[in-house]
Image: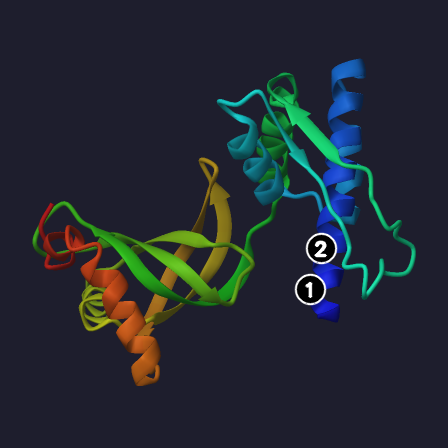
Amino acid sequence: MAEGRELVTTLLCALHAARDAADYQRATGGMEAFDAAVEVGVCHELTESLVDLVAGSAGTRVALRWSPGAGPPAGCTARPEPVEFTAGDLPAPRQAGARYVRAEPSVPVRITGTVVRLRRAAPSGPGSVRLRVLAGAEVTQVRAALEEDDYRIAGQAHLLGLPVRVSGRLESGGGFRRIRGARGVTPVRVDDTEREGLLTSLHENADLFDEACGGG
């Protein structure tokens, strides 16, 4: 409960900071407020989410009410001011998201994830994969280019419903996270319940079987 309330409080602060930064950008054309907002939780993923929420709509309004029994956390009001974003605000978070990606350094990682996409140009040789991240980085998905042996292991793990572990350097490219120099792909053991869930997800994406076997 305490962790959940802390996360909600952080998100609320980040949304208000993003709102203020968008106002500053519209008034001055400057992005400095988005730079400062990183300290309170504004990031590339948050700006992307805001754009996704608002795009194609009249606007988005986020309101929060604390449980009357628990009351608000220390330093918070019982009824925080709602945060609103409209289509006219979209250029600011879009520019901020691109700015965050450009400024983000690559970092060494060892990621565990499930293979959700495999692709290579020929039945043999190197290929690329997309992983849904389970551990090792605070991102949801990453791409990686793999040599033939690592690609084969990733494909086998995908067919068996097993996650894989891979090392490399996490960086941004084209608005998407990728692992540069990906290597050392190894399957990860999971219990039967987790494996069943992964296999169910695999069967729901049966179109990936051909790619996993080296086609397309």
Three-letter amino acid code at the position of disc 1: Gly
Q: Nearer the viewer, residue 94 or 207?
A: 207
Judged left or right of residue 121, residue 98 is right
Residue at point 44%, 61% (across, down): 133
| Residue hosting label 1 | 4
Q: Looking at the rendering, which quadrant does residue 36 occupy?
A: top right
Residue at point 76%, 49% (across, down): 65
Judged left or right of residue 91, residue 26 is right
| Residue hosting label 2 | 8
Q: Dot 2 lies on which element? A: helix
Up the image or down, 34 lies above or below 14; here it is above
Residue at point 56%, 28% (across, down): 54
Q: Nearer the viewer, residue 123 or 80?
A: 80
Q: Which mark is residue 87?
A: none
| Neighbour tally class for label 2: few under 14, some 14-19, many 20 plus, Cα within 10 Å | few
Number of on-image labels: 2
- Residue 136 in view of the camera: yes
- Residue 150 in view of the camera: no
Residue at point 74%, 44% (across, down): 14
Judged left or right of residue 51, residue 32 is right
Three-letter amino acid code at the position of disc 2: Val
Give the colour scheme shown.
Answer: rainbow
Proximity of marks 1 and 2: CB atoms separated by less than 8 Å: yes
Residue 197, horizontal then vertical, whole percent? 31, 71
Up the image or down, 82 lies above or below 210; here it is above
Judged left or right of residue 98, residue 76 is right
Q: Dot 1 lies on which element? A: helix
Q: Looking at the rendering, which quadrant does residue 97 occupy?
A: top right
Residue 139, horizontal then vertical, whole percent? 51, 54
Residue 171, horizontal then vertical, whole percent? 50, 49
